[in-house]
Amino acid sequence: MWKKKRVMLVVTGGIAVYKACDLASKLTQKGADVKVVMTEDAMKFVPPLTFQALTRNEVYYDTFIENDPSKIAHIDVADWAEIAIIAPATANVIGKLANGIADDMVTTTLLATRAEKYVAPAMNVHMYENEIVQQNMRKLHALGYHFIEPGAGYLACGYVGKGRLEEPITIIETIASHEKQEHLFTGKKILVSAGPTREAIDPVRFFTNHSSGKMGFAIAEQAAKLGAEVTLVTGPVQLSVTHPNIQRIDVTTAEEMYEAIWQHYNAVDIVVKAAAVADYRPKETYTDKMKKQKGDLMIEMERTKDILQSLGEKKQQQFLVGFAAETKKPLEYGADKLVKKNLDAIVINNVAQDGAGFGADTNIVTYMNKKREKKHIPLATKEEIAEQIWQLIYQDMKEGS
């Protein structure tokens, strides 16, 4: 995969810079076209001339050096790159990127590039474990940065622990494996539902639930990253999509979601129904605001259409995945739903658990396929959960589960 691949190698200050020289050499030997961007501190360990000799390309280190007046250097290299590798990545540059700071050649270029970004941290073990650094890494991961975990061992500072820059060959193999996975669902059409629905009582009041849509949006974004053409049907949420391969359809009510899903259902290969759709709606709605009256108010409710049930009944080629948000006996109720709705798999979570409720940035789920094989996914960000769900879906489809 590396032949003629345009790679921007970003080198930040630390003793591990010597490994970046080896990484640049190995990438070049594999046929990649490598351009190196360095921080001022990185140059204190290795001069730009070393990387120029290894890659046979100009090295970029100063935002204000413009050797070609027809181009703006940091924008030119940012647009040129297909893959950006930050190795070693210090706590400083990770923090700057997580907070949108662009104050040198490295940060301005990275914030301007649309290349796939891989981060290989290297720092003292206590710095790496610092909650601020961990938060910055989680933030970048949620924004689409891919992290290559540092190795454990003897560090230059004298400590022994996690923080050593991963070996160049491992970095190369990890990226190659991930890039291959980026095409897992190329050619597939995927339909995802997300968020709550709202069922009006009158012009100012409605029934809804606590769903934020974060899990469904994470699933849609990850599917697009894996090469799929995604249609996302969402209820009213305060979220946006970032991937160009996602077609977003906004709806409000359960009936509107039913209609939107069925408009696309027959043409798709996979459906993940993560939306929290209202089971009931007011039987009567009012065109004018209801006025407060003495005594209690009774509102008669009627069932909405069971979207997942209807999809399961008329399923043809589709791989159909449902969600079960429970507060007790989650696996029992989830397994029952898997069978009743004719699903290929179900994602079950107990929303009463800490870190797994509606609106949270994290989740804890169990994936169950129709063979009743279960995979528990412990507490993780919803983006990380989505990655694992798609891996499990791919494996089940490959095995014909």
Image: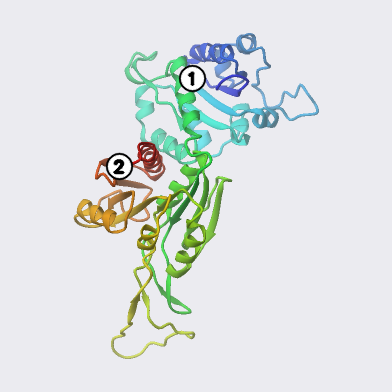
Q: In this view, does 134 lie to the left or right of 47?
A: left
Mark 1 residue crowding within 10 angstroms, few (<14) / some (14–19) / many (20+)? some
Quarter location, residue 369: top left
**Quadrant the N terminus occupies:** top right
Q: Where is residue 253 in the image (x, y as percent from the top left)?
A: 45, 69
> Which quadrant does the C terminus fall into?
top left
Q: What is the residue that sits farthest to the right in this orientation?
A: 70
Label annotation for residue 379: 2
User: Which residue is found at the position 45% from the left and 41% from the top?
Assistant: 142
| Front-most of residues 77 and 135 | 77
Which secondary structure, mark 1? helix
Q: How crowded is mark 2: few (under 14 residues within 10 Å), some or many (20 or more)?
A: some
Compared across the picture, whether 59 is left or right of 150 comes to right
Mark 2 or 1 closer to N-term?
1
Camera-nearest label, 2 or 1: 1
Going 61% across and 12% down the picture, which residue do you hit? Answer: 51
Displayed quadrant of residue 107: top right
Residue 184 percent across, percent down from the top left: 47, 36
Q: Which residue in the protein does label 1 denote? A: 172
Q: Position of residue 81 (x, y in %)?
A: 63, 28
